Image: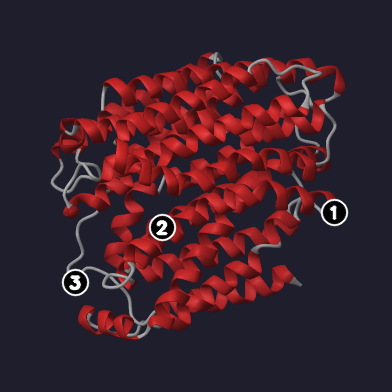
């Protein structure tokens, strides 16, 4: 019933996107929102719902991985692609999506992203094998990129003359809230309903987000004269990221070494192209000449690389080795993300008083200490020990994230905030992609195509321990950059 309703609404909204467009001048739009507080806040609720649902499903699906593996008879390498497929789908259109929204309309791209996400997520009921699920995750990633590229931009426009900072702060916190609730909600749904429910049960809320935008956003925001989109640069970046991602995932296979080389070569071609084209996706020279900005980008890349595999690896470790239920595993992992959500707004105020350099350095170091604890997990590690390590990770990342972003945004003029926001989002996504590619490679090398059975638990533990050691090194390097390079 839910998936049929989602499909119906998605079709209707796709038709709305392409056949209906209320014409309003920018001045008329701004006057409308200045005089209609109710419409402003309903738009914010829509974007908050969309961001919450997307991030919740990302973290919730990781908790469901052991159940997915059993139901679809998938091997260890295949299930490790479940988080990676969404990331890959997102990253290949991340750079051009913002410019595309400015040209075609932010509302239009937002509706396409949300309705597409609802439609694709509902189609999980048709999934019968791991290959179909991975294809579904790629399309979820494409839709996610459109939602993130337009959501905050819509909020910024609607609240341009009233409570913009508050609205953006509330909306941004929905990302952490989704990540925090995902493990618990995903664990409960997986345990008491079915892992497919993790995908289709949030769909009605995404439909509500769509309805709120349709009813409360009059007109659209787009450039009067479309700016050129660097499609060649977009293709170069997409092929570079794809080749590198696929190559790293199955090293040291000779063919995949070639993929890595191709990815690196294409990246340098992309950088050279960005320096020469008249409308680059990234202004390379402006980025490299800004020391606080480039330091923030590097630190963000390292920290997100270190942090992203936590939910995936601990979900496997707790459910297989400690034999806990999905909901219990989700509750354990909730500790880190809940602390992050609480500390992130407070750390911004601390950075105003003590400077971003000190807070990001302390945060990334505490984050590293968390991995110093977790690298000692074994077959008999107590739950209290794991909870202590997760708490340290949450404190560290919560202290690091907001001051690091604030340092980056504060290093440029207002006219370049959009560019910097895209670059920081790219660093986050690239960090996630690198770490998942490494975990896939490690899983392939140690576990191969074997399903995860009790006799393979020592090998699974080795994957977890090595990954945490690498994350420790990345966290310490981020601390070094935050202190000496900012």
- Can you say whether 467 is above or below 103 in the image? above
Residue 259's label in the rendered image is none
Assess disc 2: are there few (<14), some (14-19) or many (≥20) residues with their C-alpha within 10 Å of its C-alpha.
few
Residue 15: percent from the left, percent from the top? 49, 78
Residue 107: percent from the left, percent from the top? 38, 71
Residue drawn at x 50%, y 70% as measured from the top left: 45
Between the C-alphas of marks 3 and 2, the distance is 29 Å
Residue 34: percent from the left, percent from the top? 30, 81
Residue 425 appears anywhere in the view: no
Of tags 3 and 2, the one toward the viewer is: 2
Residue 192's label in the rendered image is 1
Q: Circles 3 and 1: CB distance less than 8 Å? A: no
Task: From the image, tell me which residue sits under label 3.
Answer: 224
Please tell me whether mark 3 sits on a helix, a strand or a loop: loop
Assess disc 3: are there few (<14), some (14-19) or many (≥20) residues with their C-alpha within 10 Å of its C-alpha.
few
The reply, left or right, for residue 54 in relation to residue 405 is right
Residue drawn at x 47%, y 83% as measured from the top left: 215
Task: From the image, tell me which residue sits under label 2.
Answer: 169
Q: Nearer the viewer, residue 426 or 44?
A: 44
> Does label 1 or label 2 sit earlier along the sequence?
2
Please tell me whether mark 2 sits on a helix, a strand or a loop: helix
- Can you say whether 16 is above or below 319 in the image? below
Between the C-alphas of marks 1 and 2, the distance is 34 Å
> Does label 3 or label 2 sit earlier along the sequence?
2
Q: Quadrant of the N terminus?
A: bottom right
């Amino acid at each position: 019933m839910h998936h049929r309703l989602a499909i119906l609404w998605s079709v209707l909204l796709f038709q709305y996107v392409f056949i209906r467009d209320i014409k309003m001048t920018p001045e008329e739009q701004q006057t409308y929102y200045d005089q209609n507080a109710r419409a402003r806040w309903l738009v914010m609720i829509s974007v908050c719902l969309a961001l919450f649902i997307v991030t919740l499903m990302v973290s919730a699906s990781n908790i469901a991985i052991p159940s997915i593996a059993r139901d679809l008879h998938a091997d260890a390498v295949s299930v490790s692609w479940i988080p990676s497929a969404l990331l890959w789908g997102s990253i290949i259109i991340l750079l051009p999506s913002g410019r595309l929204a400015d040209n075609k309309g932010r509302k239009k791209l937002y509706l396409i992203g949300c309705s597409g996400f609802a439609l694709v997520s509902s189609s999980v009921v048709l999934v019968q094998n791991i290959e179909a699920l991975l294809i579904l995750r790629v399309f979820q990633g494409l839709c996610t990129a459109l939602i993130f590229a337009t959501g905050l931009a819509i909020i910024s426009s609607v609240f341009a003359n009233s409570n913009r900072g508050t609205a953006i702060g509330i909306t941004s916190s929905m990302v952490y809230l989704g990540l925090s609730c995902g493990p618990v909600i995903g664990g409960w749904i997986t345990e008491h309903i079915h892992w497919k429910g993790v995908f289709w049960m949030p769909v009605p809320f995404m439909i509500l987000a769509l309805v709120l935008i349709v009813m409360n956003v009059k007109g659209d925001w787009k450039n009067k004269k479309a700016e050129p989109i660097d499609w060649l640069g977009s293709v170069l970046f997409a092929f570079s990221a794809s080749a590198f991602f696929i190559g790293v995932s199955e090293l040291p296979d000779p063919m995949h070494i070639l993929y890595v080389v191709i990815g690196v070569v294409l990246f340098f071609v992309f950088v050279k192209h960005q320096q020469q084209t008249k409308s680059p996706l990234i202004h390379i020279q402006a980025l490299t000449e800004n020391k606080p900005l480039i330091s923030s980008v590097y630190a963000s890349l390292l920290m997100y690389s270190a942090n992203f595999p936590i939910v995936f690896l601990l979900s496997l470790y707790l459910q297989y080795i400690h034999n806990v239920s999905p909901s219990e595993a989700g509750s354990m992992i909730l500790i880190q993300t809940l602390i992050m959500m609480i500390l992130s707004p407070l750390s911004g105020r601390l950075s105003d008083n003590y400077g971003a350099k000190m807070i990001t350095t302390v945060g990334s170091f505490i984050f590293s200490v968390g991995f110093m604890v977790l690298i000692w997990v074994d077959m008999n590690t107590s739950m209290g020990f794991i909870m202590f390590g997760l708490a340290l990770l949450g404190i560290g990342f919560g202290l690091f994230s907001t001051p690091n972003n604030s340092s980056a945004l504060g290093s440029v003029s207002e006219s370049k905030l959009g560019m910097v926001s895209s670059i920081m989002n790219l660093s986050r996504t690239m960090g996630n992609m690198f770490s998942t590619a490494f975990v896939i490679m490690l899983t392939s090398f140690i576990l191969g195509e074997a399903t995860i059975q009790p006799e393979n638990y020592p090998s699974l533990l080795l994957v977890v321990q090595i990954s945490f050691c690498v994350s420790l090194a990345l966290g310490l390097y981020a601390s070094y950059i935050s202190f000496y390079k900012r």
